[in-house]
Amino acid sequence: MNIIIESVFIGAYTITIYWFLYKLILDKNTLFFVTGFLKHLLGWFFGFHTYYCKHGNACKKYISGTDTVRQFSNKYIPKYLQIWVESIIEGIVFLLLGILFSKLLNTHKYTIVFIMGFTLHIIFEIFGFHDNFCTDQCKRQ
């Protein structure tokens, strides 16, 4: 899958989560944290991580041959602790980025949330976090 298409999807997915939470959570900073936290946790729950293992831009080089990637696996930290830790970290990153973007961008809140999801996906791709995800957390068959 193309990184821009992936990022647009992640931006839209992020807006959807934010939209559901907006009327429930009044504090802007808590809203940013919970949006980032749920973005990651629900991505695992809905199977987006497995989809990324099979079709994601960073995982393309691991899709064929003896290291064929088939599905997401939480095999390294028992009892799914890893997904919770990663979700908390993503929540903190969203909080910090939300504060920064809210101060820098004078635009609609949904635009800011879209830009956050879009930008973070690209940043994670550039810095190799998605490569680490593909090699460490995608089960091979």
Image (tube, rainbow, N blue to C red):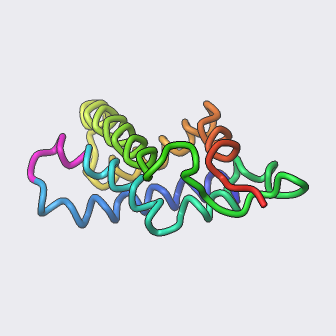
Q: Position of residue 19 (x, y in %)?
A: 26, 64
Q: How many marks?
A: 0
The quadrant holding residue 103 is top left
Q: In the displayed orientation, state which residue is furthest to the right.
A: 65
For the point 59% across and 37% down, which residue is it?
Answer: 129
Residue sitting nearer the eye, 139 or 127: 139
For the point 46% across and 69% down, which residue is it?
Answer: 46
Left or right of residue 47: residue 35: left
Q: In the displayed orientation, state which residue is furthest to the left.
A: 26
In the depicted structure, whether residue 137 falls above or below residue 19: above
Q: Position of residue 27 (x, y in %)?
A: 10, 46
Q: In the displayed orientation, state which residue is furthest to the front.
A: 78
For the point 53% across and 63% down, which residue is it?
Answer: 48
Left or right of residue 61: residue 45: left
Residue sitting nearer the eye, 33 or 18: 33
Q: Position of residue 75 (x, y in %)?
A: 58, 50
Residue sitting nearer the eye, 43 or 35: 43
Left or right of residue 82: residue 74: right
Instruction: Name the chief secondary structure element in magenta.
Output: helix
Tell me the quadrant of the picture where the C terminus can be found.
bottom right
For the point 36% across and 35% down, which residue is it?
Answer: 93
Left or right of residue 103: residue 121: right
The quadrant holding residue 70 is bottom right
Tell me the quadrant of the picture where the N terminus can be found.
bottom right
Magenta span includes 123: no
Q: Position of residue 115 (x, y in %)?
A: 42, 47
Magenta residues (range):
26-32
In the depicted structure, whether residue 84 falls above or below residue 70: above
